[in-house]
Amino acid sequence: MAAQCFKTDVLVVGGGLAGFHAAITAREAGAKVIMVEKNYSGTSGHSTFARDMMLFHEEWGDCLQDWRDQFIHIGEYINDQEWVDILLKEGYDRFRDMVNWGMPFYLREPGTTGFPGDDHPYGNAVMSDKIGFPKPEEEPFRYRHQRTKYRKSTAIIKFGKREKLMDARKKALSIGIEIIDHVMMTELIKRDGRIAGAMGFNTRDGGVYVFECGAVVMACGSLTFKPAYFSVQCNTGDGVAMGYRAGAELTGMEFGTGMWVCKDVDSVTIDGPVAELGLTEDCFTNGKGEEFLDDTAHLPTNIHWPLEVHKGKGPLFHEPYNYDRSNFEDALKKYDETAEGPWLTMMDRAGIDIFHDRFEQYMSFIGNIWPGGLKINTKCETSVPGLYAAGDSAGSNFTGPTYGTLGSGMCHAAVTGHRAGKFAAEYVGERDSVTFTQAEIREFEQAVMGALERGYGFTTEHVLTRIQQTLFPYEVRIIMKEDRLKAALTMIEFFRDHLLPKTYASDFRDLRNYHEVRNMIVGAEVMLKTAIMRQESRGWFFREDYPRRDDENWLKWIIAQKGQDGEMTLSTQDIPMEWRGDLSLPYEERYMLQYRLEED
């Protein structure tokens, strides 16, 4: 089958919230835009399942400095404060964009409040039940958990339906954006040191697709390893790996994310729906029956859970709510339709009644969702001319090692998507187009299809399983130590050098699996090498052999890049002095999150 060739100004890779913002903005700026998605644009990726978006607006009484301080303190002084300001100041305009696209949100009604106040229990809010389209300057329903030393200011809005991105798809098509689904991009193409195009293949019929373009916006999600977390199953670091192979810098890759997994459902459950409805706090106990989180807020528990297991106090349990479910059927139905995932449906199918049953949960490593990615400036430009990044593919360092607040990832996706689209459109207006020769196209085809033509060797399933077995144990990438990190790196390098060259794809769908494990191996190597390099603990990044923050040596970002010889190079960039906070404060006062290292 001959390769299909396309020519466009801006190629957007990824059909989630960041991708749609980038594509629509670039198109409205006058650029010809093609959006490519390996699944189906509007139904794939992390943002499809997101229920919340952080929203700051001074006209509603929000204090910019208070919101900034929350990010700075939770980010422990290594988040990019310029990006924090951009997200806070531009989030409202992106919210209005989405309303104009036809996305509904929960509306504020008389008698409802998402701001319970300092003296109320966790989550004690009066939830809105009305969904619609807020008018300009009308404040939608906004929700904030109890104020704690971790969370003090930020508030979130709630999307009115899970299929919200289909509204963005309709908007994109209506203004002339060409959307190509079920095509996985595998490689960027450079000419004279800048991006000239990209190539990939159709995962259903195997057709090779070659794109000639002036700029590429990578908005295809984060680096994960197909974990027990349904909304990131397709996010395998494709954009990060393609950018790395093209010579782009990566940043924040040492940081990782763990999530609570219900053992009997094998998927994630976060704050349960009863707490979301403002009735009570979720209660968690260890194997000894002790409530081990005490008054700890949501944010640092990603470390406290695995530390409790590491002390030998597992397993960990979610205690029953002991409420009459029949009293909340209408509210729970709406929750199940609009929340990150159909938690109640999944739990019910597993035979677990969260109102009356105690069930086991554990902390599972997911990958690098928010903290890192392709290093960008405030124009969302990477270090490779013509390559832009947005959403979870972008390394803006806005959050630091710990997720700053609920809904900030969606705000980041919207704002970076808009900026990437805007500046990519400006960039291509200054460049001449390129044309690939037939010889180049044949070379592209071989690069894409090589694993399919091999016909024998290791299966992609085997390679994926070995990657997961290496990275998923809590003691490797959550509770870290140098000898365990190096042992894991040795295995990843073995997969890279021995397994991958001998891996074959059995059909077109399996060819997608091949390219995904290829990208995951790149991401795992970067993740482990940068984690070894950072010899301290900070936020969700915990080193058992370096259990304290090291402000003298590690107020800096780590940057990874593919060198001229093909080997990975690591360097650091100092955090600006004005962003480092008051270094004279006592350690326990400067850092709100204290690791519980003592054992009974």
Image: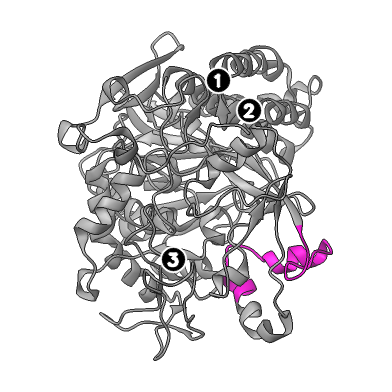
Residue 412 higher or lower than 479, as above or below: below
Residue 481's mark? 1
Q: Is residue 124 left or right of residue 271?
A: left
Front residue of 372/550: it is 550
Q: Quadrant of the N terminus?
A: top right
Closest to the observer, 189 or 282? 282
Q: Are marks 3 and 1 in contact (CB under 8 Å)?
A: no
Image location of residue 488, percent across then percent down? 63, 19
According to the picture, the residue beneath numbered tag 2 turns out to be 475
Q: Which residues are magenta?
A: 335-358
Quadrant hosting residue 282: bottom right
What residue is shown with label 3? 145
User: Marks 1 and 2: in contact by CB < 8 Å?
Assistant: yes
Residue type pointed to by label 2: Glu
Can residue 332 be seen here? yes
Verify CB contact (< 8 Å) between mark 2 and mark 3.
Answer: no
Is 212 part of what is drawn in magenta? Answer: no
Q: Amino acid at mark 3?
A: His
Give the quarter of the image for residue 484: top right
Mark 1 residue type: Lys
Q: Secondary structure at mark 1?
A: loop
Instruction: Identify the secondary structure beneath mark 3.
Output: loop
Of labels 2 and 1, earlier in sequence is: 2
C-alpha span from label 2 to label 3: 31 Å
- Quadrant where the C terminus sits is top right
Q: Residue furthest top?
A: 565
